[in-house]
Image (spheres, grey):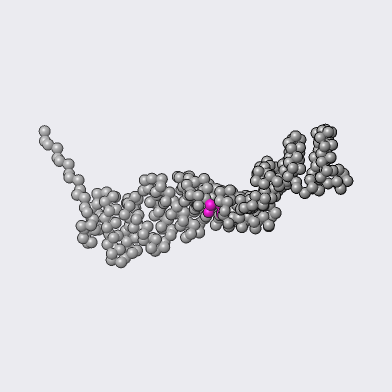
Amino acid sequence: RPAEPAAPPPPRRVDPALLKTEEIEAALAKAPNDVERARILVERAKRELVAGDREKAIDSYRDALAFETTNAAALEALERLYRDGKNVVRLVEILEQKLDLAKTDGQRLEGLLAIAELYENDLGDLPGAITRADAAHGLQPKNAKPLQALARAHHKAKDYRAAIEALEKLLRGETSRAEKLETLLRIASVQENDQGDPEAAIDTYVRILNEHPQHKAALDDLARLADKTGSWKAKAKILEHKVELAKEPRRQAETLVELGDLLAVADRAPEEARKHYERAARVFPSYPMSWRGLEQLSTWSGDAARAEFYLEQRVRHTQDLAERARVLLELAQFRAVTLNKTAESLAAYELAHKADPTNETA
């Protein structure tokens, strides 16, 4: 049996860098596969660039990609050439092709954001920018960069609701305390200046001051909006700040009572008002208005026994005798009408007369 003929040896791989310029076309014709053709074309493009023929080099790099769409050398070179030449449309094409080479979500994210930036700033295509930034956000939902890009593009598109949604997500993402502060300030600015919603801006400034009580710019803006809108929320937060600044116990108690009076309305925050009155009573017990606030809240809530106790404290801490007589009369009437305590009511009347004999009611 005759021996089978030996298989032909595989074609020898050519190093394109060793080819003479006049040999390149022949090497292309003999190349065994598309990958080899792409390597040779990349070498040709490099030489064309050295010769100063930029357009020919671009054509050669593009020809290389036609044979091997993932040729990294061609992609990198074209990205550089298109950036230098400010050919944004072609640059976007190359960056989108490079996404196929990305091996990690982080690389894909950076690529999508680079494309989104070109759509936003160079092409003026905000929907295109938003689509790419949103895709990047989907890869890493807590990463700050895509959310910042989304907020910026939505704001430019005048979709302020969507911009605020992106900024709110940013607050829950991977950002520092200082970055969260900056984001809240941006939200407040959009709410007031773009949406024309000062009440929403006030809520945001209150959030800022809950975390940064000494932030002067936020306090100033809140005071400005309080004057502009008459917002009780804004006034309450400003009073809270004044409480902490007050050095004298009496002044602190007076401010706490002012804050309590502001909140002691059914549709506001009566329970918060109670806390402020109680704190005022602890800070400076001899200031009777804190006891008056606690008495009123107890009366409104139907806690007559506690209301009586607070009335008694008002009597105890009222120094002016004429004023003390008037408070004793309140106590006497409360005991008689609400608690049906006749004897105790009479005793309060007697104390009122003793405190101010000129008081005709006593």
Q: Residue furthest right?
A: 360
Residue at the (52%, 48%) spot, across then down: 171
Q: Nearer the viewer, residue 192 or 161?
A: 192
- Evaluate whether residue 316 shows in this view: yes
Q: Main secondary structure of the magenta part?
A: helix
Residue 257, horizontal then vertical, whole percent: 69, 48
Residue 255, horizontal then vertical, whole percent: 67, 50
Residue 312, horizontal then vertical, whole percent: 75, 40
Above or below — where is 171 with respect to 307? below
Total number of numbered discs in the rendering: 0
- On the picture, is 10 further left or further right than 272? left
Residue at the (23%, 57%) spot, across then down: 17
Residue at the (67%, 50%) spot, across then down: 250
- On the picture, is 90 further left or further right than 281? left
Tell me the quadrant of the picture where the C terminus can be found.
top right
Q: Nearer the viewer, residue 99 or 180?
A: 180
**What residue span does the magenta drawing correspond to?**
181-185
Q: Is residue 100 magenta?
A: no
Q: Is residue 184 magenta?
A: yes
- On the picture, is 54 further left or further right than 154? left
- On the picture, is 45 further left or further right than 184? left
Tell me the quadrant of the picture where the N terminus can be found.
top left
Residue at the (75%, 47%) spot, across then down: 319
Q: Residue furthest bottom?
A: 52
Residue 324, horizontal then vertical, whole percent: 79, 45
Q: Nearer the viewer, residue 291 or 8?
A: 291
- Evaluate whether residue 192 shows in this view: no
